[in-house]
Image (cartoon, grey):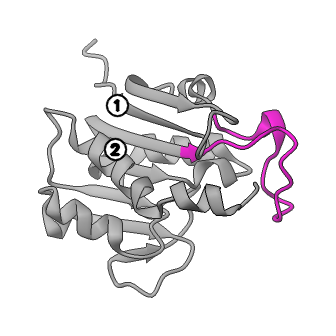
Amino acid sequence: MQYSRSFLAGFSPDRRIEWTMFLLGSAPDLAKDSLLIVGPRYEPELLLARGLGWDQAGIRGLDTFSYSPFIDVGDMHDMPYPDATFSGLVCGWTLSYSSRPQAAVREMQRVVKPGGYLVVAVQKVPPDFVETLSEVPRGPDRVQTLERFDALYDRCARVAGFEREVGSGGEAHTIALYRKDFPDAT
């Protein structure tokens, strides 16, 4: 990634938070009683969730480390929550760093209630992008398209999604909103 002056002029970390939270908040039948934010590290997403009407007592974050008592330290591949705990889940800008995305998505789908919503977003990078962390997937192994999202979120139906392609100007990204299926009535 070329972090040039022109790139940074259009870069807004707050926009990343807003995109995911506003997309999730747009689901008209979403219960705002419980929300898990995967990878918040700090508290802006949690504060925005409160401002968007989520019950303060039901908002949790999960990250590999944090200073905040509102963010549980843990692993998105093995979440410390019972099945069907949250009505909503946000996973912003972390899934593409996972070397085990299927395990992470399986956990996300497990902790969301039937009929609940999940929003996921990642930054898209060119196939030849050199990642500084050796364990981060590269090229076709990196989860960064709606097609890959749809294959992973197999217990959910995509409600909305969009991709901004690499080279289209500004930051390239993929964002999708899914609704977890209800169990079969049979």
- Give the left or right position of residue 39, taking residue 25 as reference: right
- Give the left or right position of residue 128, taking residue 89 as reference: right
- x then y, percent, for residue 165: 63, 31
Report the front residue among 99 and 83: 99
Residue drawn at x 31%, y 51% as measured from the top left: 21
Q: Main secondary structure of the magenta part?
A: loop
- x then y, percent, for residue 181: 33, 25
Q: Is residue 112 above or below residue 176?
A: below
- Give the left or right position of residue 46, taking residue 174 as reference: left
Q: In the rendered structure, which amino acid carries the disc numbered 2?
A: Val
Report the front residue among 43 and 16: 16
- x then y, percent, for residue 130: 86, 54
Residue drawn at x 50%, y 47% as measured from the top left: 107
Q: Is residue 183 above or below residue 177?
A: above
- Residue corresponding to mark 2: 112
**Could you tell me if the residues under marks 2 and 1 are in contact, i.e. CB atoms within 8 Å?**
yes
View extreme (bottom): residue: 67
Q: In the rendered structure, which amino acid carries the disc numbered 1?
A: Lys
Q: Which residues are magenta?
A: 122-144
Distance between mark 2 and mark 1 Cα atoms? 7 Å
View extreme (top): residue: 186
Q: Is residue 155 above or below residue 67?
A: above
Q: Residue 116 lies in magenta, yes or no? A: no
